[in-house]
Amino acid sequence: MPLDVICNGGLSAAIVDVNLGAEPSFKIARALQDAGTPFAFMTGYDQSAIPPEFAEVARIEKPRELRHIVRAVAALQEAVDAWRS
């Protein structure tokens, strides 16, 4: 389901939790990257857990207060707005 939404251009930006289930969510991150959708990782892991191909992607460390998450989403949306201008 998430990959369908990404492939159909249904997102303007995303926050990706690195580990939500049985495997890391890097497949979703690759799809977002391929679609040109800005995103940030949210994780309790350090930078070494993130593959080098995502070295430039912002990382929000858990635990984090809601206001920090809101700021990260706002920054992603600003990037989208600037790209569209």
Image (cartoon, rainbow, N blue to C red):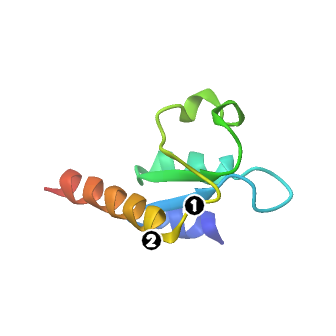
Query: Which residue is pictured at 54% across the width and 70% down the height?
Result: 5
| SS label for mark 1 | loop
Q: Quadrant of the C terminus?
A: bottom left
- Which picture quadrant has residue 3? bottom right
Left or right: where does residue 72 sit relative to residue 63? left
- Which picture quadrant has residue 22? bottom right
Q: Is residue 51 above or below residue 61?
A: above
Q: How many numbered marks are there?
A: 2
Front disc: 1 or 2: 1
Q: Nearer the viewer, residue 8 or 20?
A: 20
Badge 1 or badge 2: first in the primary sequence? 2
Query: Which residue is pictured at 22% across the width and 60% down the height?
Result: 81
Q: Quadrant of the N terminus?
A: bottom right
Location of residue 37 in the rendering, given as x and y in whole percent from the top left corner: 42, 54
Q: Nearer the viewer, residue 52 or 33?
A: 52
Query: Which residue is pictured at 48% across the width and 62% down the height?
Result: 14
Circle 2 residues within 10 Å: few <14, some 14–19, many ≥20: few
Left or right: where does residue 27 sit relative to residue 81? right
Looking at the image, the residue that sits furthest to the right is: 22
Three-letter residue code for mark 1:
Arg
Q: Is residue 56 above or below residue 84?
A: above
| SS label for mark 2 | loop
Q: Nearer the viewer, residue 73 or 4?
A: 73
Location of residue 24 in the rendering, given as x and y in whole percent from the top left corner: 75, 50
Query: Which residue is pictured at 40% across the width and 49% down the height?
Result: 36
Location of residue 64 in the rendering, given as x and y in whole percent from the top left corner: 57, 60
Q: Which residue position is annotated with label 1?
A: 64
Three-letter residue code for mark 2:
Gly
Q: Which residue position is annotated with label 2?
A: 10
